């Protein structure tokens, strides 16, 4: 009998087959390895910006994509969702473990789009508009149409993972009213959490501790318990309050307040006390025109965001003839992060969940690209290399580990 030491090893091809089987099983079960720092992904959306025909002619070219932190490895996500003409996709977020992407799949009837261009307003009617949110497993490509299960609306946006990782928040359009909802991870058990006397709600988010939610309703800020009860109005005295976002410790809300087109960042405690203006945007309108053709919707909102540790806020502000990127401590000391050529503008600052990096958009030399900045030394790197008539928008960091999610405000 051969000793264990002298036994022949299995043939090389047997080892390879065994390895393939194990990897296939691993992926099938969804047990993907967490990405390293170098492998972490940034999800974002690419689209054309100068095609004739108005808003829809360009929005219909939107495609969800991912790339690595260093700008390599760019690829489309769930291209199979482009299943008919005038359909498009948008990258909208990540699961808490970073294994699934939140992808919107939209479609609009081109005749309806022409009506909207003529009347300069949306007409989101059933049969004319479709918007659904999908969960896409990056390793396997499996998709789950969670808003299509036990459907409550033809138009479902704002999907995010609740901090407990067991539910999803989203905002369906029902009878012309946008309403905060929650549902199970498989799309079942959908329920309204808007409370009594609900109006048109948007900017729905959940506090990291899972105890409270917030949203703006008819452009006023509300806080409620996670189930929608205990709804409280945060009164600023201003007609336009918008886009509430929770601090890492769940104790503060950040939002913009003022009048539409001229608002500034404000803070308020969870209990409604301590309301104060944090910074001055220098007259910045608060939205980015992401098309080079006339857009009746006036682009995409560009609002302040918390740092990962909740001790400062990133925002964009007007300075001379530029829109630059700033960071401000809660003590009120701002500092400018970008110094660009005249006519440049920046948008959608998004910190990584470990607090080391910032990804943001920058329109320089007429093209909207994505950039990263390592916050320790403020060293900037350009990620995308798009050409005139294209844009990169709405970046989202892939979580590296569950520990990162503890310091993340779940907002969309």
Image: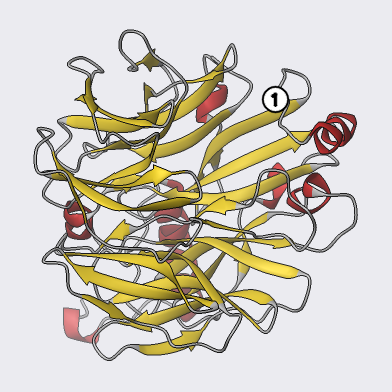
Position of residue 8 relative to residue 137, above or below, is: below
Across and down, in percent, residue 286 comes to 48, 55
Q: If the image is split into quadrants, where does the C terminus sit?
A: top left
Across and down, in percent, residue 124 comes to 70, 25
Across and down, in percent, residue 161 comes to 34, 39
State whether residue 67 appears in this view: yes
State whether residue 25 appears in this view: no
**Horizontal relation, residue 180 to residue 279: left or right:** right
Which residue, as the protein is rendered here, is positioned at the far top?
A: 196
The residue at which mark 1 appears reads as 124
Across and down, in percent, residue 331 comes to 11, 66
Which sits in the foreground, 23 or 72? 72
At mark 1, the secondary structure is loop
At label 1, counting other C-alpha atoms closer than 10 Å, the crowd grade (few under 14, some 14-19, many 20 or more) is some
Q: If the image is split into quadrants, where does the N terminus sit?
A: bottom left
Q: Please tell me which residue is depicted at 76% across the width and 63% down the height of the picture.
A: 292
Q: Please tell me which residue is depicted at 61% across the width and 26% down the height of the picture.
A: 155
């Amino acid at each position: 009998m051969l000793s264990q030491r002298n036994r022949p090893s299995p043939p090389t091809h047997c080892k390879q087959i065994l390895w393939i089987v194990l990897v296939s099983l691993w992926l099938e079960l969804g047990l993907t390895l967490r990405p390293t720092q170098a492998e972490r992904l940034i999800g974002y959306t690419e689209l054309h910006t100068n095609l004739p025909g108005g808003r829809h002619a360009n929005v219909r070219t939107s495609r969800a994509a991912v790339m690595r932190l260093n700008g390599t490895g760019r690829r489309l996500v769930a291209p199979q969702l482009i299943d008919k003409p005038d359909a498009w996709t948008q990258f909208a977020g990540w699961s808490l473990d970073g294994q699934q992407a939140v992808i919107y799949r939209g479609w609009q009837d081109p005749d309806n789009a022409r009506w909207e261009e003529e009347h300069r307003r949306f007409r989101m009617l059933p049969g004319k508009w479709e918007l659904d949110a999908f969960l896409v497993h990056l390793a396997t490509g499996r998709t789950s149409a969670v808003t299509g299960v036990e459907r409550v609306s033809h138009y479902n946006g704002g999907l995010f993972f609740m901090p407990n990782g067991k539910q999803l928040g989203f905002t369906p359009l029902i009878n012309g009213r946008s309403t905060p909802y929650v549902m199970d991870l498989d799309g079942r058990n959908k329920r309204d959490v808007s409370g009594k006397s609900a109006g048109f709600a948007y900017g729905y988010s959940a506090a990291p501790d899972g105890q409270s939610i917030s949203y703006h309703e008819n452009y006023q800020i509300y806080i409620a318990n996670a189930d929608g009860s205990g709804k409280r109005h945060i009164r600023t005295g201003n007609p336009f309050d918008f886009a509430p976002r929770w601090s890492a410790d769940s104790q503060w809300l950040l939002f913009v307040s003022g009048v539409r087109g001229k608002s500034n960042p404000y803070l308020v405690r969870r209990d409604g006390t301590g309301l104060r203006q944090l910074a001055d945007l220098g007259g910045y309108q608060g939205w980015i025109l992401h098309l080079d053709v006339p857009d009746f919707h006036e682009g995409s909102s560009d609002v302040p965001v918390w740092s990962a540790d909740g001790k400062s806020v990133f925002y964009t502000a007007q300075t001379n003839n530029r829109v630059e990127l700033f960071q401000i401590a809660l003590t009120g000391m701002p500092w400018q992060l970008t110094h660009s050529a005249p006519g440049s503008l920046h948008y959608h600052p998004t910190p990584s969940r470990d607090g080391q990096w910032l990804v943001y958009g920058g329109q320089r030399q007429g093209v909207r690209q994505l950039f990263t900045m390592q916050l320790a030394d403020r060293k900037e790197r350009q990620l995308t290399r798009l050409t005139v008539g294209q844009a990169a928008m709405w970046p989202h960091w892939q979580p590296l580990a569950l520990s990162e999610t503890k310091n993340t405000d779940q907002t969309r």
